[in-house]
Image (cartoon, grey):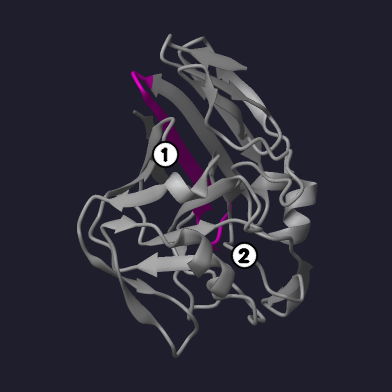
Amino acid sequence: MILDNGILKLELCNKGGEMSSLTYKGLDVLYKGDGPYWSGKNPTLFPMISSPNSKKYILDGKEYPCRNHGLIRYATLDTICDDGNKVVMELKSNEETLKEYPFKFTYHITYTLDGNKVLINYDITNDDDKVMPFTFGLHPAFIVRDFEKMSLVFEEDEEGTVIKDASNNYKMKLGEYKNFLKDVAELKTIILKDLKSKYVLMKTEEYNVKVDMSSFGYLGLWNADQRADYICIEPWLSNNNIKEAINPFADEFELIKLNPNETYKIGYYIELC
């Protein structure tokens, strides 16, 4: 599936409902999962961000297996609209998803192009007869060919809280941030909260990428290895602090609790300039 407006060319795949390629001025912008350090590209994180280290959890007295970041990234979605202007893909809960997440749901992801923006919107409907707990996050990876010439510019010149662990958080001065490789080597994932900025701009010599985070309370920054040629800029609804959890859907965690027959809507954009 391809959307092309003469400014951006976006290629999509049914596996995970993901973007497989984004081209701007003839340049590839998205990491394609073909490097030696990570096989992912831009997964959706639902119904959990990260996963318990045990790769299992207990809910209402029953044990369930789980995989990192939940269900969507491993599923093959159905295309329900591809009209040249937008693409909509769908995953409905099924026998396989219920083995890992015991709730009936319908998940939609919609892609459209608007000038130099990719608009990505999500609709999650609770098809069950009980309240459905979940969290949600994004994980797009952008190519960086020279980290020495890359910086992240936040909309506001501010201090964000860096989450190091449960008892050892600290403030980081933001505005134009250039210490990604150093900090990610120490922290593994740089997790920021308390941000006033509605977007962050990744500046490179070849292009700039603005990532909207206005609907999200956290921002993760990650790559798998200092030699890797990408950075993941990840708006999240919650922290990834479920690694030691017996139940990642317990009340102590930041969760959306969706009533039966209700739909949760959220979205963001990626802008090239």
Q: Position of residue 261 (x, y in %)?
A: 48, 47
Three-letter amino acid code at the position of disc 2: Ser
Displayed quadrant of residue 40: top right
Query: In the visual, does 75 lie left or right of 152?
Result: right
Q: Secondary structure at mark 1?
A: loop
Are discs 1 and 2 less than 8 Å apart at CB?
no
Front residue of this view, candidates 234 and 261: 234
Q: How many marks?
A: 2
What label sits on residue 32 in the rendered view? Answer: none
Q: Is residue 15 above or below residue 56?
A: above
Along the horizontal axis of the image, is 4 left or right of 53? left
Which residue is farthest left? 157
Residue denoted by label 1:
204
Quarter of the image with the C terminus in it: top left
Res 229 → quadrant: top right
Magenta stretch encompasses residue 129: yes
| Secondary structure mostly seen in the magenta stretch | strand
Q: Residue at x 65, y 82 (%)?
A: 244
Q: Residue at x 62, y 58 (%)?
A: 226
Seen from the viewer's position, the closer of residues 45 and 106 is 45
Farthest front residue in view: 148
- On screen, residue 126 above or below 107: below
Residue found at x 30% / y 50%: 153
Q: Residues within 10 Å of mark 1 (few under 14, many from 20)?
A: some
What whole-number distance in Å separates the C-alpha atoms at marks 1 and 2? 29 Å
In the image, the segment drawn in magenta is 114-138
In the displayed structure, 7 sits above or below 36; it is above
Q: Position of residue 257 (x, y in %)?
A: 45, 63
Q: State which quarter of the image contains the N terminus.
A: top right
For residue 207, what is the image quadrant? top left
Task: Report which residue position mark 2 lands on.
Answer: 50
